Image (cartoon, rainbow, N blue to C red):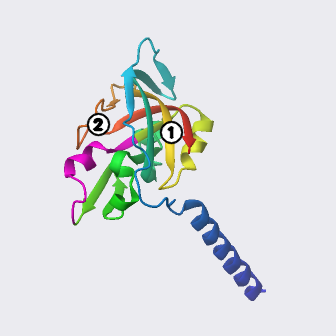
Amino acid sequence: MRMTWARLLFVFLIGFGAYHYVTQREVEHGPGVLVAEEPYQGSAGSAAEQAVGAFQLTPLAIFSIRARVLATTDYYFGREAELSPIDLALGWGRMSDENVLKDISITQGGRFYYWRVNTFLIPREEIQTHSANMHMIPADAGVRKALQSIRVGNVVRLHGYLVEAKAADGWRWKSSLTREDTGSGACELVLVQSVEVL
């Protein structure tokens, strides 16, 4: 009987590993720029504040982006994770080109995105201004499910608002409003109303 359970466990682990590989492996496209256009940011106009859980969100700008996913990380603990459970590192322009990305090491951690190169195929400033780590706030359960299905290499289209989040005890988390900044405070905090994997 022990041998039977061991075999079943082995088969299960092999099956799970194969499923994980197929559903999570990086999507490859071949060389060339996949996304030529810049992200769009405009006035939030009269967009109303809204509550998400224990947080109050103030729209700062309307925001749309089509980009290649460079990295994705789920977060489970802490106040930020309650609001934004997923970070996407996104690239556009030459930061969506596999020829460029193959020589850039990309990681995420602690709500930041890190990159490292041995040789610059494009200027440092272009890497910094054509990629960004963005904190995703799903507008509803459907958006959350779609965000969780995204794989590295996917080209995605996101639409929503850049926001400032506040809690009753005075805690705040505010989105960057430019793609030109780096370091602490440079990430976008995005209330995602729609997401499409292209």
Residue 150 visible to an observer of this rendering: yes
Who comes first in sequence, dot 2 or dot 1? 1
Above or below 159: residue 8: below
Residue at 46%, 15% (x, y): give it: 47
Residue at 32%, 62% (x, y): give it: 105
At label 1, counting other C-alpha atoms closer than 10 Å, the crowd grade (few under 14, some 14-19, many 20 or more) is some
The residue furthest right is: 1
Residue 62 sits in which quadrant? Answer: top left
Amino acid type, mark 1: Arg
Which x, y percent locates residue 46?
44, 11
Which x, y percent locates residue 79?
41, 39
Viewer-proximal residue, 100 or 184?
Answer: 100
Above or below 91: residue 47: above
| Relative side of 125 to 157, left or right | left
Q: Secondary structure at mark 1?
A: strand
Amino acid type, mark 2: Arg
Which x, y percent locates residue 192?
50, 33
Q: Secondary structure at mark 2?
A: loop
Region of the chain picked out in magenta, as a range: 119-134
User: Does the magenta portion include 179?
Assistant: no
- Which quadrant: the N terminus? bottom right
Above or below 193: residue 197: below
Residue 166 sits in which quadrant? Answer: top left
- Which quadrant: the C terminus? top right
Viewer-proximal residue, 48 or 53?
Answer: 48
Q: Which mark is residue 179?
A: 2
Mark 1 — residue? 157
